[in-house]
Image (spheres, rainbow, N blue to C red):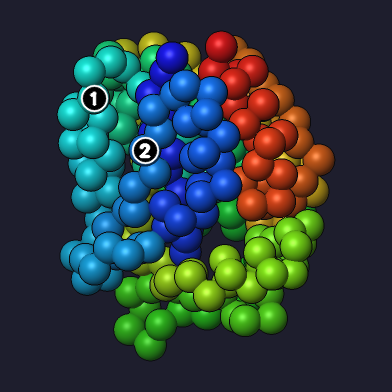
């Protein structure tokens, strides 16, 4: 059996995987779903956050495991797992990008998002007064993130979102063929995603070819709307 480390996306926390964890654990896997610094229940001040801090928090967690892990990143979590793979490639059995930012060296989340003509998230961005973080306007949360979720699930998730530190999504990723490039990759596409358009997902996956891919007919949050189908896809692409 495998150890899965699940890295959440922007505004979310480890809580977003709550329906996925028991399904993977029931299959015999070990599953870790940490909060990144300043998100979820973590109390790190936003001004202390860097992409390197996020990376190193996951590196420390992986280094505590006895075997190489399957490292899964959702959405903005994609740049975090890429940075982790660059730093400790031998500790990762496979990278899985779940409708995630699979950035080229020197690219940032913001730079990629600005080219995504299919995304509907832009009008709902709400920066903090000092520019250190970004929130999503209330009326945009459900249409962008939880369009196919049950109303009670969407309300629960919406209540747990926190401001996203700007530095994490503005910092360019650094990856090399020698380190990141030798870790096997997989991508799970979400066909009806309104946060990251399908064309952008496919463009990123083509830019760094993935050994395996799977497609879910869901919006941006299959861990809430279709956890069983997501676990089946994870199992398939993780091999």
Quadrant housing the N terminus: top left
Residue on which the image places disc 1? 65
Q: Residue at x 59, y 26 (%)?
A: 234
Q: Check residue 43 in the rendering and tell me which mark sits there, or answer none.
A: none
Quadrant housing the C terminus: top right
Answer yes or no: is residue 188 visible.
yes
Which quarter of the picture shows residue 59? Answer: top left
User: Few, some or many C-alpha atoms within 10 Å of disc 2 (few <14, some 14-19, many ≥20)?
Assistant: some
Which quarter of the picture shows residue 131? Answer: bottom left
Q: Earlier in the sequence, mark 2 or mark 1?
A: 2
Badge 2 marks a residue whose secondary structure is strand
Q: Residue at x 81, y 40 (%)?
A: 217
Q: Position of residue 149 (x, y in %)?
A: 73, 59
User: Few, some or many C-alpha atoms within 10 Å of disc 1 (few <14, some 14-19, many ≥20)?
Assistant: few
Badge 1 marks a residue whose secondary structure is loop
**119 versus 135 height, above or below:** above
Q: Considering depth in this image, is 127 or 91 the residue closer to the camera?
A: 91
Q: Position of residue 27 (x, y in %)?
A: 53, 23
Mark 2–mark 1 Cα distance, whole angstroms, equals 10 Å
**195 versus 143 height, above or below:** above
Q: Position of residue 152 (x, y in %)?
A: 69, 69
Q: Position of residue 232 (x, y in %)?
A: 67, 26
Q: Check residue 32 in the rendering and tell me which mark sits there, or answer none.
A: 2
Are the residues at dot 2 and dot 1 in contact (C-beta closer than 8 Å)? yes
Q: Considering depth in this image, is 206 or 69 the residue closer to the camera?
A: 69
């Amino acid at each position: 059996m495998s150890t899965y480390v699940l890295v959440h996306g922007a505004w979310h926390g480890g809580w977003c995987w709550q329906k996925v964890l028991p399904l993977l654990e029931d299959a015999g896997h070990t599953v870790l779903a940490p909060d990144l610094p300043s998100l979820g229940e973590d109390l790190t001040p936003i001004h202390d956050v860097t992409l390197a801090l996020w990376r190193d928090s996951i590196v420390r967690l992986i280094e505590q495991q006895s075997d190489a892990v399957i490292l899964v990143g959702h959405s903005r979590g994609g740049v975090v797992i890429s940075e982790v793979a660059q730093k400790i490639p031998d500790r990762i059995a496979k990278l899985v990008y779940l409708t995630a930012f699979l950035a080229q060296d020197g690219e940032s989340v913001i730079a990629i998002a600005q080219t995504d003509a299919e995304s509907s998230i832009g009008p709902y961005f709400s920066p903090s007064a000092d520019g250190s973080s970004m929130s999503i306007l209330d009326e945009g949360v459900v249409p962008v993130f939880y369009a196919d979720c049950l109303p009670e699930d969407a309300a629960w998730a919406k209540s747990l979102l926190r401001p996203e530190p700007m530095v994490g999504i503005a910092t360019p990723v650094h990856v090399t063929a020698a380190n990141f490039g030798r870790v096997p990759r997989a991508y799970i596409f979400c066909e009806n995603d309104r946060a990251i358009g399908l064309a952008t997902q496919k463009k990123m996956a083509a830019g760094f070819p993935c050994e395996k891919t799977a497609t879910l007919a869901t919006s941006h949050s299959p861990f809430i709307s279709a956890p069983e189908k997501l676990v089946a896809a994870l199992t398939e692409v993780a091999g």
